[in-house]
Amino acid sequence: MTMTLPTPTGSSSTAIGQVRLAVRGLRKVFADDPRPALEMLHRGATKAEVLHRLNVNVGVAEASFDIRAGEIFVIMGLSGSGKSTIVRLLNRLIEPSEGQIRLDGRDLTALPYGDLVEVLRRDMSMVFQSFALLPNRTALENAAFGLEVAGVKRGERRKAALAALERVGLADYADRYPDELSGGMQQRVGLARALAKNPTIMLMDEAFSALDPLIRCDMQDELLRLQREDARTIVFISHDAEEAMRIADRIAVMEDGRIAQIGTPAEILRAPADGYVRAFFRGVDASRVLRARDLARPPDDGTAGEPARFRYRTDPEGRFRGVLAGDGASVLFGLEPVAAETPIQALLGRVAAAACPLPVVEADGRFLGVISCSALLAALDRGEDAGRGARHG
C-alpha cells in the first residue's frame, strides 16, 4: 500500500512539517528501451514478472511519497528491494525512467542539466557507506571538497569545513589524513563534508552500515544530536530495522521495487500493513521504540453501559488536574502523570503498580489519555509466529 500526502504548493522557505520532496509515479527500468517494461508495470506486473518475460531488471517498479521538511525519512527493505536506487534517483545520479521528483515544487526531472547541477550543489549533499574520502587530502580538505567543486573561495570553504568538523567533534583532527583516522572518524569527516554545504536535504545511503556496532550507535546518536540543532531534511537508506526505528520520524518499507507501507515507527509496529512488514520488524523491541503517547487512549467514561471506575479531571485548557474514584467521593493522591515522550520500557513497573490507568500528558500538561495494563501488554505482545523466516539482508 502506497501512502501519499497532499501535493506541495512549493516554497524555498518551506516550514518544518510541510512537504519538501514530493515523488510521484517514480519508476526505474535498467534497459536501453524501457518502454516494454513500463507498459507491463502499468498493467500491474511485478518486478519478477518483468524479469521473467523480458529479461529486464526493474530497480523501482513504482514509488509515490512525500518527505516533510525537517524530518528523518528512512527508506528500508531487503537487498534488491530498490531502496538504494531510489536515493540515487532523487539526486539523478541515476536517471528515472518515469515519474516526477519535486523539490519545493520544482520538478527536478524536467530541469536542464545546468540548472540541475546548480540545485544539487546548493540543496543536496550525500553521505556514502564507503566514506568516499580522498586519501591524499586532510580531513579539513575532504570536508571542504564539496564547496571546492561548487567554486567557493578557499578562505570561505576552509572556514565552513572547519566549523563542520567542529560540529562532529573532529576539529582537533583537521590536519590528519584518512589513514590516520578510525572508521568512525572517517565517517564523521564524510558527515562534516555534507554539513559544510549547509544543504536543504541530506541523502545518506547505508551511511553507518560499514561501522562496528558500538561506533554505529555513536554515529546514530550524533545524527540525532545534529538533527535536534538543525531540523534538516534527511533521507536515510537502511536495511536494519533497529536503526530505522531508532532514528526515523517516518519509515518507508520497500518490497520488490514498491512501497509496502509508510508510517511512523509506532504506526508500523502497531499496525503493519502486511506479513512482509510484520516480519521485517518482528525482532524489534517495541518497549524501546514506543512512547507513552503511542499507547494513550481516552479513559473509560461510563458510556459503554458500566459506571466508570475512575474520572480524570482537567482544567478549561485541557491540562491534567487529578483522578477521582468513580463515585467522585475520593481523590487518588500522589498519582504523577506520565510525560508523552517517555519510553514504554521505563513505564512497565509504574503501569503494573498503579491503582488506575496512568494519565499521559504533553510537555505543557495537556491531558492526552491513559495507559492501562491491558493496552501495554497488547502493544508488547506482537505474536511469536509473526513473519517467521524474514531475512534482513
Image (tube, rainbow, N blue to C red):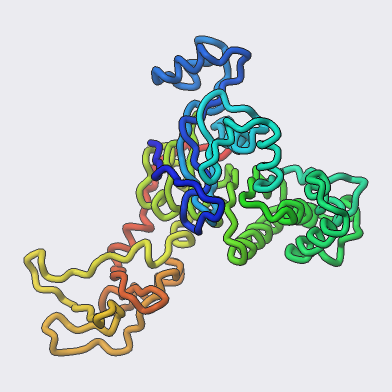
Where the C terminus falls, by quadrant?
Answer: top right
Residue, x 47% and y 59% (percent of image)?
Answer: 289
Residue, x 36% and y 55% (percent of image)?
Answer: 381
- Is 80 or 175 nearer to us in this picture? 175
Where the N terminus falls, by quadrant?
Answer: top left
- 254 shown above or below 298: above
Location of residue 275 by image quarter: top left
In percent of width and height, residue 327 lies at 11, 83
Numbered circles on residues, count: 0
In percent of width and height, residue 120 lies at 67, 42
- Is 45 or 95 nearer to us in this picture? 95
- 331 shown above or below 296: below
Residue, x 39% and y 67% (percent of image)?
Answer: 292
- Is 42 or 75 nearer to us in this picture? 42
- 226 shown above or below 56: below
Tell whether 75 sits left or right of 347: right
In percent of width and height, residue 236 lies at 59, 47
Examine the rendering and report whether any part of residue 181 can be seen: yes
Residue, x 50% and y 59% (percent of image)?
Answer: 16
Tell whether 61 sits left or right of 373: right
In percent of width and height, residue 253 lies at 48, 41
- Is 209 or 237 nearer to us in this picture? 237
Examine the rendering and report whether any part of residue 79 can be seen: no
Location of residue 189 by image quarter: bottom right
- 119 shown above or below 223: above
Tell whether 217 sits left or right of 132: left
